[in-house]
Amino acid sequence: MRDRQLRARDMLRGDLEGDELERYVEEKVVTTTFEKLLNWGRANSCFPLTFGLACCAIEAPIALVGSPRYDLARFGAEALRASPRQADLIILSGRVSIKMAPVVRRLYDQMLEPKWAISMGACSSSGGMFANYAVVQGADKFMPIDLHIPGCPPRPEAVLYGFNKLQHKIMGNPDQGWRQRYDASGSEEWARGGPRSEPSPEAAAAYEEARGLIRA
Amino acid sequence: MPDGPGLELIRGEIEQDHPGAVLDTSFDREQAALVVDPAQIIAVLRWLRDAPGQGYGFLSSLHAADYLPAEPRFGIHYELLNRDRIERVRVKAMLANPAEGLPEIDSCVELFPTAEFQEREVYDFFGIVFRGHPDMTRILLPDDYVGWPQRRDFPIGGEPVTFTYNERNYG
Amino acid sequence: MAELATAGGNLDTEVMTINIGPHHPATHGVLRLVVDLEGEIVRDLRPVIGYVHTGIEKSCEDKSYWKVIPFVERMDYVSYFFQMEAFCGAVERLVGLEIPPRAKYLRMIFLELNRIHSHLVWLGTTALDLGAVSMLWYCFRERDRILDLFEMATGQRMHTRYFQVGGVIEDIPRGFEAKLRQFVADMPVRVGQYQDLLDRNEVFLSRTKNTGIVSRERLLELGVTGPLLRAAGEPWDLRKAFDYLAYPEMDFKVPVGTVGDNYDRYRVRVAEMIESVRIIEQALDGLPEGPFIADDRKYVLPPRSELSTSMESLIHHFKLVTEGYRVEAGEVYYAIESPRGELGCFVLADGSAKPARVHIRDASFVNLQAFKDMSVDSYVADMICSLGMLDPILGGVDR
């Protein structure tokens, strides 16, 4: 203790040099790369989308987030977001029927990167027990999935374990641009023509008209 | 349920008002069923609902079944319930698949408004058109789906499950 | 400022058609509503369903009778025991099998537990929609206790495959009765707590009273059954009307409402929870001893202890597991009272080991037709409240 105080005094006076300085800095400062810090933040404050399809939706998100026993909030994922533009994580909880598949794809496209998808349960991972005309045999037929959780329905503890694995995946992967991961460029969805495009002539005229109304 | 003799009484009374409507009766496993000519189905349903002493005013369920290979192949079942006497009776209309086009039958939505969604479901799954229905479109499958899934000759779909071991070792 | 006022005076109103899409925090499941709005007032409403259509009825035609049970229970995924009972009951009537009294009581206990479970899920999610967010946590705390009981007896929290044709698959373990009795003792206190939170809450009352009223006659025309019909004043409950399982021996009341608005629907369901607790108590007190599944080896698996001693049992077991039992040609429609209304099962047998047609008349599918009547000419917020009180489960609607 006395030793530390002496070193601190020396530090403040500018008297520490060389090796002593290096040791001091190592003890006091945590060094990390910026990506690791960013990934740690992303993993521990995921915003899931409020999205439930069928039976697995009762087990999660409702039983996971809305239940006092299996609490997703301790992993930082309590803030469920209804709008896909604000969500990071989509948990496909339930069977994906052929009518719902384009809707799910559209939701996934509307999410902003970085984004992850968990396919929860047997039905969204592989069609489950429903090998028939009406269920898509696995959601990874039409969208990239990061994690599959087996079960019918999986226990909430299983989903929590899967969520932990996803957190490790997020933290461990320095490059999480999913378009590079899945070689999926060209599937971007832009409003109008692109990130720096001009508004369409009708939109521009309507805007001018509205401005004129207020001004006049 | 009306028991065996009761069912025959009902058949006799319907015969008086609508001759030739009831083709057959069956009392099987304590459930009464009347097999009715599809052209007169509305008259029979109206009689069962309105005739004094009958009062089957609640349509529990309207569904269809495909009796392939028996002919006629489609059976449309109307499960009627009399809530005062707690009795159920089933009315069946048997339809054959015409050579062209879709089988048709009159819709009972004016008599029983509960049939609206249920007739759409029967159309969706079997292709049976209900004449007079306000909105005869698919209800559960996507609007551009081709085929009538619940028919017996429609394949169940899905894909075969392939195992890497088999694919790799046995081609 | 004055210019803005005159700008408002020349407002040209029109009826806007908006889409409350399949993904929405307030639709219970993937229900899509196409709503014609004039301002905030709903003028027309068209539900578009089918987003979780799974083709269960078609899949059932491909499976032997006992393999149909897990399919059928995944339709209305909150009240899974009821679907099992509807199907097993229908097949038992087709086959002419009588189930032993202990099985009847056990089935009844699980059905009423599932009714409480379904009403808890309903109450939690509906209160969440209306803004009473903490109800979700309280209801799901109780729901987890019920799921613990299910797991103790059957091994699974949901979709337990517990009912089989002939009875139940396994007897209840030791300790189940004690745990259930404790749950039954605690439950009325909890329901009292829920009522304290919501019953006289000014905001809840003003949102639910006198909203979503449909007359009794119109509901009957539309085929609506269950708590919706009872809230409108019609005392129709299939448990009292048709004698199935051991309900005739139980003493319970059927709560009936007066006005038929959303507040009555809420009160009816909460009262039903208390009545279910009473039924479970009576069933536990009167639980008879005896076999838990029927004896007929042609339809029921023999107990495993016999397989090593009796050749016949081995043959029965082999036949039942590989091909399944054949049912003579015939058709049966069997209906029970599920938490949402009349749940009917139609089974058509053609003499082979697989059913030729299984159709479930689902209560939510028919109840959804009343939604338009409930919401037209009222505000959008009332429509959301009515949707919660209607309690649709889209798995049952879409099958």
Image (spheres, rainbow, N blue to C red):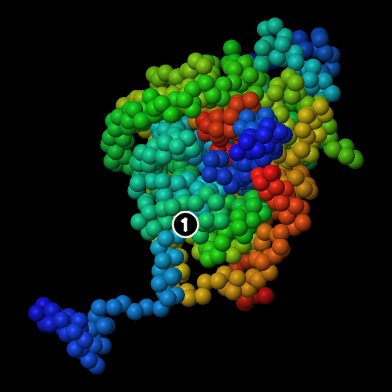
Whether residue C392 is situated above or below residue A98 in the rendered picture:
above
Left or right relative to C11: residue C320? left
Q: Secondary structure at mark 1?
A: loop
Does residue C295 appear left or right of residue A103 in this picture?
Answer: left
Q: Say which residue appears at 55% left-offset and 30% top-offset.
A: C382
On the image, the x and y values in percent for residue A161 come to: 40, 61
Rendered residue at 42%/33% (across/down): C116
Q: Is residue C349 visible?
A: no
| Residue extending furthest toward the left | A2
Foreground residue, B88 or C328?
Answer: B88
**Nearer the observer, B112 or B134:** B134
A98 is higher (above) or lower (below) than B118: below
Q: Farthest residue toward the right? A: B100
Q: Which residue is mark 1?
A: A47
How many residues crowd mark 1 within 10 Å: few (<14), some (14–19), many (20+)? many
Image quadrant in which you'd find residue A109:
bottom right
Q: Position of residue C77 (x, y in %)?
A: 52, 42
Q: Position of residue C17 (x, y in %)?
A: 70, 38
Question: What amino acid is labelled 1 in the image?
Answer: Phe
Q: Is residue C157 above or below residue A198?
A: above
**Image location (x, y in percent) of residue C251:** 39, 19
